[in-house]
Image (spheres, grey):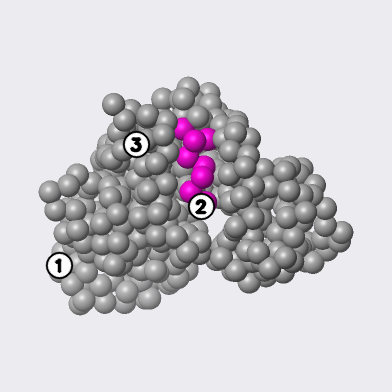
Amino acid sequence: MTNQTPVTLGLKKSFGFGDRLGLAGPGHLAALKTSDFAGIMAQQSIREMNRTDRTPEQVMRAAQETIAAAEYALPWGADADHLKCEADVQWTAEAGFCFFTIDPSEHVVNEADDMDEAALTAGVEKLVANSVFDDASWEKPYLEGQWDIGSRVLKFDRESLYRAAVKYARAVEHCGAMSGFIAKHNANKLYEIEVSVDETDAPTSHLEHLFFALELRRRGVTVVSLAPRFIGQFEKGIDYKGDIPAFEAALEDHVAIAKAMGPYKISIHSGSDKFSIYPSIGRICGDLLHVKTAGTSYLEALRVVCRQSPALFKEIIAYSADRFPEDKASYHISVTDDWVAGLGAIDADEVKYLDEDFGRQLLHVTFGSVLTKGKAASGRSFKEGILEVLENNADLHAELLEKHLGKHLSLLNAG
C-alpha cells in the first residue's frame, strides 16, 4: 500500500534529499532502491524556501505526488530544516512535516573561543543572573563528573566548562524554547527533533558536544540527531577538504558521545559530494547516521539543461557570475570573486561547470537568484526554462539523479 504520509524514522539511518525544483523525487526514489537508508523525501530549509519562493505545502505536495506515482510503500520522512522561530515551526507543522531541525546559530557566542578568564567569568555570571542557569551551583556536577565515551573519559575543568557555557548556553536555551513550540504545534502527532550546531566559526570540540547534550537533557529536550561542526571543510557541492585520519578520529568520539548521551544520530550537514569520507562516515556511524543533501540535486538538474539546452545553460552561467559576489555572502566556499571575474568566454562545458569545484560552487550559491530573479534574453524566467527542459527530459533527469545520489548511498555503505 502506498504511504503518502511522512512518518518519524527514529534511529534508523537516514538520508535527506533536498529538492529545490519539485521534480527530483523520481530520481531520489530510484537512488534509494538498492539502499538500506530511509529517505527524507520532503526536505527544505526556511532559508531555501525563501530563496526559491516555495512554501512548505509545495515541498510536501511534490514529495507526496512522487510517492503516490511510484506506489512507494516504505516509510519516509519530511524535514523542516533550519528552523529559528515559532512561526517557522507552525508553518511547517501545518504542512505535515514531522522532523524538525532547530537552528540555534544566532544564539551561539563564537567570541567565547578567544575570551580571557575574566571575560568568561563575567559571561557565566550574566548567564546565572539571567536565569539561563538556575544558580551558581550549576557548575558542580560538571566539575565533579566524568563521562566514559568508550575510547576515553571526558572531564571538564573550569576553563573548558566556562568557555562551553558562554558559547552555547543561550543556544541550548533557545533549543528548549523551540522544542516547546514544536510540541505545541504537533499536539497528538508523532514528531522528532534534530539540533544543528554546525554553523559555527570553529569545529565543535568533544567537550562542547558533551556540554550541549547534557544541557539538552537538563532541559528535557530529546533529539533524534545532532549536527556538530566537524574538523576540515564541508563546503557546498564539493568533496571534503582536510585530514581524513584526523576527521575519522574526531568522528569516532562524536559518535561515542551520541551513544552515551542518547543514543541519537550524528547528522552530516552540507553532506553532499563528500565522496572521500563516505566510507569512513558509514563505518564509524553505523545506523546512528543522518546525511543531508540539497544543492547537489539542483546541479544535476542543471546538468540536464547543459546537455539539452546549452544556450540556456550559458545564459544561466553568465547571470550567476554577475550574482556571485552578492550571493556567496552566506556561504563558506573556496571559489573567489577573482576566479569568477576571470571566467573569460562562457561555453556549455559540462565538466568545467558541473564536475569541477569552481563551476559547482558558482552555480550552487546562486540558485536563489537564478530561480526567482533571473531571466533569459527572451524575457522568459530561467525557472520556467529549467522546468520545461526537465519536464521534457524526465527520464534523463531521473537517470542522472539515480547515478549521482546512488553513488552517495553506495559509498556510505562501503565502509
Task: Report x, y in % for residue 411.
Answer: 55, 28
Mark 2 crowdedness (10 Å alpha carbons): few <14, some 14-19, many ≥20:
many
Check disc 3 and give the amino acid type.
Trp
Amino acid type, label 2: Arg
Q: Which residue is mark 3?
A: 76
Residue named by callout 2: 20
Residues packed near mark 1 inside 10 Å, few (<14), some (14 to 19) or many (20 plus): few
Q: Is residue 9 above or below residue 21?
A: above
Figure quadrant of the N terminus: top left
Number of numbered discs on residues: 3
Residue 139 locus on image (x, y percent): 22, 61
| Spatial CA span between label 1 and label 2 | 43 Å
Give left or right: position of 309 versus 239: right
Depth check, front residue: 74 or 358: 74
Residue located beneath label 1 in the image: 134
- The picture places residue 20, in percent across and down from the top left corner, at 51, 52
Say if the magenta span includes residue 186: no
Position of residue 50 measured from the top left corner of the image (x, y, whole percent)? 46, 65
Sooner in the amino-acid sequence: mark 1 or mark 3: 3
Dot in front, 1 or 2: 2
Q: Is residue 24 magenta?
A: yes
Q: CA distance from mark 2 to mark 3?
A: 18 Å
| Comes first in the chain, label 2 or label 3 | 2
Q: Secondary structure at mark 2?
A: loop
SS class, disc 1:
loop
- Disc 3 secondary structure class: strand
Q: Nearer the viewer, residue 270 or 252?
A: 270
Outermost residue on the left side: it is 188
Q: Which residues are magenta?
A: 21-29
Give the amino acid at mark 1.
Asp
